[in-house]
Amino acid sequence: MADWLVWLIAAGALAAAEVLTLTLVLGMLAIAAVAAAAVAGLGGPAAVQVIAFVAGALLLLGVVRPVARRHRHTPVELRTGAAALVGRRAIALTVVDAHSGQVRIGGEVWSARTYDEHAVIPAGTAVDVAQIDGATAVVLPLEIT
């Protein structure tokens, strides 16, 4: 079997594994394997192919991956929909416990429950939105120090 084909099969396997894991590491290794396949396709010896793979992997993992990781999470300013409500302040309109309650987030009234199932938040208390679970805001009492 041709060397370039072995490298392409390895690149495909690494790319498939990346799709399943989403770690960014295996995808970078797949790209490095494509570089090694290109060297093999040009007739480079096995040692040069391995050097191309290692150099490509080190370059991608050392330079590209940190940049990609910084850009992976959407900044709060760019979130939309329910995701934009996480981290915002709200006011409890009714008593909020682990099963029911209502809060006002901005100008909207949301059904709510507490993050801590043993907590009870009285009406009028400021809360932080910890997450949105369907159409229910999961809240924590605002801690003022």
Image: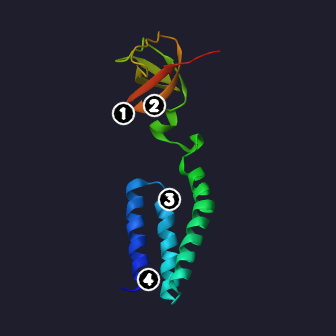
Coordinates of residue 102 in the picture (x, y in percent): 42, 18
Instruction: Kindly report the distance in space between the C-alpha atoms of the residues bearing marks 4 and 3.
Output: 22 Å
> Looking at numbered disc 3 in the image, what kind of residue is underneath it?
Val
Along the viewing direction, whichever of 71 and 80 lies nearer the viewer:
71
Which one is closest to the eye, mark 3 or mark 1? 3
> Looking at numbered disc 1 in the image, what kind of residue is underneath it?
Gly
Query: In this rendering, is residue 125 above or below 18?
Result: above
The tag on residue 131 is 2
> Looking at numbered disc 2 in the image, what kind of residue is underneath it?
Gln
Which of the marked residues, 1 or 4, is nearer the chain's N terminus? 4
Image quarter in which the C terminus is found: top right
Instruction: Kindly report the distance in space between the C-alpha atoms of the residues bearing marks 1 and 2.
Output: 10 Å
Element type at mark 2:
strand
Which one is closest to the eye, mark 1 or mark 4? 4
> Looking at numbered disc 4 in the image, what kind of residue is underneath it?
Trp
Residue with the mark numbered 3 = 25
Residue with the mark numbered 4 = 4
Q: Residue furthest bottom?
A: 43
Residue with the mark numbered 1 = 134
Q: Residue furthest top?
A: 122
Image quarter in which the N terminus is found: bottom left
Which of the marked residues, 3 or 1, is nearer the chain's N terminus? 3
Q: Residue furthest right?
A: 145
Instruction: Kindly report the distance in space between the C-alpha atoms of the residues bearing marks 4 and 2.
Output: 48 Å
